[in-house]
Image (cartoon, rainbow, N blue to C red):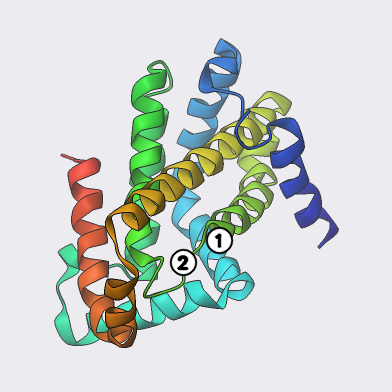
Amino acid sequence: MNSRKSSIVSIRSNTSYGNVGTISSLTFSQKQALTVSWRLLKPQSSACFRKIFLELEVASPKVKQIFYKAALVDAFNKDEENSATLEVHIKLTVKFIDDVLSSLDDENEFVRKIRAMGQIHAVLSRSCNFSAVIWERLGEIAMERICTHETVQKTREASKAWRTLIAILIDELRGGFEFELRQHRKNSSTDQIDKNNGEDDEDLHTKLQQLRMDFDNTMPYR
């Protein structure tokens, strides 16, 4: 637990929100360390991300509820392209890291991709009570699991680079998420929100489908 707390302190103290270091702060050797260590970690990444998401479910019951409902819908629907189950999230996270690392030398594109990912999760804020705090908890767990993984621990440079990368990822994900929430609030009246309060469960399937479609549009993999 102490290591978990120190991880999130590291995110906040080294690069506080609003003043987070950018990807350009990474040296050439650190970028190289990220690429090499990810190549080694990737074959084991599904197991690593599964642990991260399962720990996130424990830390945030809201996340567990989202994945549970997604699995329930998936059991009847079998529409994998629009699924948002834990297993699908694991696969998409691997692709997301691939895509992010491919943009290390293009900071604008790097930030755009991450913020877009944060934005598309904003659809879950009302019906699922998905909040910015969840991004912080994800950062705590990811930093502990990834930075202590044996493939990353092989070099000090890789561990330091992943800590910096995760801090930036969480900040930009949260930034995109909160930006989209502000936009939504500007465009939504109190009457509309009150009217929809009883439709959360029915609306979740639609929101999960939209989340997956938005992801595919944002991160087109060939």
Image quadrant in which you'd find residue 206: bottom left
**Label 2 environment density (alpha carbons within 10 Å; few <14, some 14–19, many ≥20):** some
Locate the C terminus and report the quarter of the image it occupies: top left
Q: Does residue 119 appear in this view?
A: yes
Going by the numbered disc 2, the residue's amino acid type is Phe
The numbered mark at residue 130 is: 2
Going by the numbered disc 1, the residue's amino acid type is Ile
Measured as percent of width and height from the top left, residue 108 is found at: 37, 21
Q: Does residue 98 appear in this view?
A: no
**Label 1 environment density (alpha carbons within 10 Å; few <14, some 14–19, many ≥20):** some
The numbered mark at residue 143 is: none
Q: Is residue 128 above or below residue 34?
A: below
The numbered mark at residue 134 is: 1
Q: Write the residue at 28% across / 77% down.
A: 204
Image quadrant in which you'd find residue 112: top left
Instruction: State yes or no: discs 2 and 1 in contact (Cβ < 8 Å).
Output: yes
Q: Write the residue at 41% across / 40% down.
A: 97
* Cα gap from disc 2 to disc 1, whole angstroms: 7 Å
Image quadrant in which you'd find residue 198: bottom left
Measured as percent of width and height from the top left, residue 53 is found at: 51, 64
Kind of element beneath mark 2: loop
- Relative placement, left or right, of 103 versus 167 is left
Q: Write the residue at 41% across / 15% down.
A: 105
Measured as percent of width and height from the top left, residue 104 is found at: 43, 22
Measured as percent of width and height from the top left, residue 106 is found at: 37, 17
Q: Nearer the viewer, residue 20 or 218?
A: 20
- Relative placement, left or right, of 165 versus 9 is left
Kind of element beneath mark 1: helix
